[in-house]
Image (cartoon, rainbow, N blue to C red):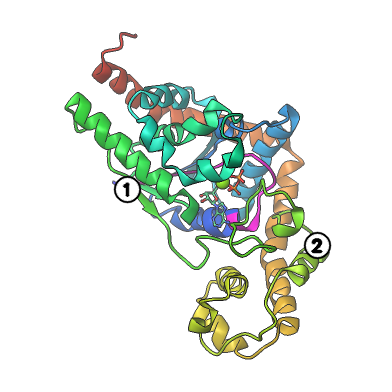
Amino acid sequence: TPRVFSGIKPSGGLQLGNYLGAIKRFVGMQGTMETIYCVVDLHAITVWQDPADLANGTREVAAGYLAAGLDPAKSILFNQSRVAAHAELGWIFNCVARVGWMNRMTQFKDKAGSNAEKVSLGLYAYPSLMAADILLYHATHVPVGEDQKQHVELTRDIAAKFNHDYGVDFFPLTEPVIDGPATRVMNLRDGTKKMSKSGDSDMERINMLDDADTIAKKFKKAKTDAEPLPETVEGLKTRPEARNLVDIYAALDDTTPETVIAQYAGAGWGTFKPALADLAVAKLAPISQDMARFMDDPAEIDRILAQGADKARAIADPVLQRTYDIVGLLRG
Ligand code: ATP
Ligand code: MG
């Protein structure tokens, strides 16, 4: 049976790319498949997190999940560090994955920049823990943004090498699910970089908790060229910033870029940007209001995460036990 796993790091406030590329799609898969969604706090600490911010950020991601429509009765919702099996299987996968594989990860290169000697060892090994997150549940499908494709492919490589080395057919080869118009929402100030929670400037992203005025201001100041919107989507090919704003509109409105262009062909940015801001506020305001309500009751969020962790452990612990048996590690 298909089983879905995915996660978001509490490494800063949720941004529009997390919503359109991940959370909104997580909600869409709920009910039709078994769904497991995690707040991956152990991944967040691969870069420094202030402890109070980490705890608060963990609750914020959980609140985002709940406010967007994830239902703890239909999906397993929990934070990663509550289920010790993630870290345990992650270690075993550190011993399966090859250094050469990690060296090819483009996200590590992006995040480490010119500082690769000074970043944490955890940041380097992160894809191996991510493989553990997924394979601990024998997940078959992982909905992610385009930026995570390479890590899900590495998860397949780890599963295949483990199965081969130990002569078993134990871990499945997981499929990344990357679909819709917002698989890579770009930075509002630089159309060649993706929008990220941890980006330097707040003006480059829309945060899910931004108020209406802030959203309008950020879209107004978003970088664009001076041309009006083209007559067809082909006309967006060499215009990354324009393409991004049209894609965001399409994703928010549950339509296609073709439909958006059909509606706004020839329009100037003075028309399109306020329309985009209004649409974003209409879609995000109910969610951010709900998020704020959940955040007002941290004990309730903690209770939901703890209950989700109990359900997660019921699946994960036997898989870890079986893995230890396969590897020849005595326990129990
Ligand atoms: P960080 O900057 O700390 O890496 P992030 O914004 O990239 O934060 P992650 O927690 O790394 O967020 O990713 C959570 C999910 O959101 C992943 O599935 C990822 O692919 C997706 N995602 C992140 N940014 C975007 C984006 N700009 N467009 C579409 N999906 C995105
Ligand atoms: Mg990221």
Which residue is drawn at the image coordinates 80% and 62% (left, top)? 214
Can residue 72 be seen at all in this image of the molecule?
no
In x, y percent, where is residue 190? Answer: 65, 62
Q: Which of pointers 1 and 2 lies earlier in the amino acid sequence?
A: 1
Taking the image as shown, residue 262 lies to the left or right of residue 160, namely: right
Q: In the structure shown, which secondary structural element does the residue marked by tag 1 occupy?
A: loop
From the viewer's perspective, is residue 241 above or below residue 155?
Answer: below
Which residue is painted at 24% across and 20% down in the image? 326
Q: Nearer the viewer, mark 1 or mark 2?
A: 2
Q: Position of residue 70 (x, y in %)?
A: 55, 50
Coordinates of residue 81 in the picture (x, y in percent): 55, 27
The answer to whether 111 is drawn above or below residue 241 in the figure is above
Q: Quadrant of residue 52?
A: top right
Q: Amino acid at mark 1?
A: Pro
**Disc 2 marks which residue?**
214
The foreground one among 318 and 88 is: 88
Callout 2: SS? helix
* Number of the label disc, if any, that sits on residue 2: 1
Quarter of the picture holding the C terminus: top left
Left or right: 263 as drawn, with respect to 177 = right
| 3D distance between C-alphas at marks 1 and 2 | 40 Å
In the image, 138 versus 214, the foreground residue is 214
Q: Position of residue 114 (x, y in %)?
A: 60, 40
Q: Residue at the spot x=47%, y=24% of the render?
A: 87
Would you say residue 260 sits in the magenta stretch? no
Residue 304 located left or right of residue 328: right
As for residue 5 lying within the magenta part, the answer is yes
Observer-nearest of 36 and 19? 19
Range shown magenta: 3-17
Circle 2: residue type: Thr
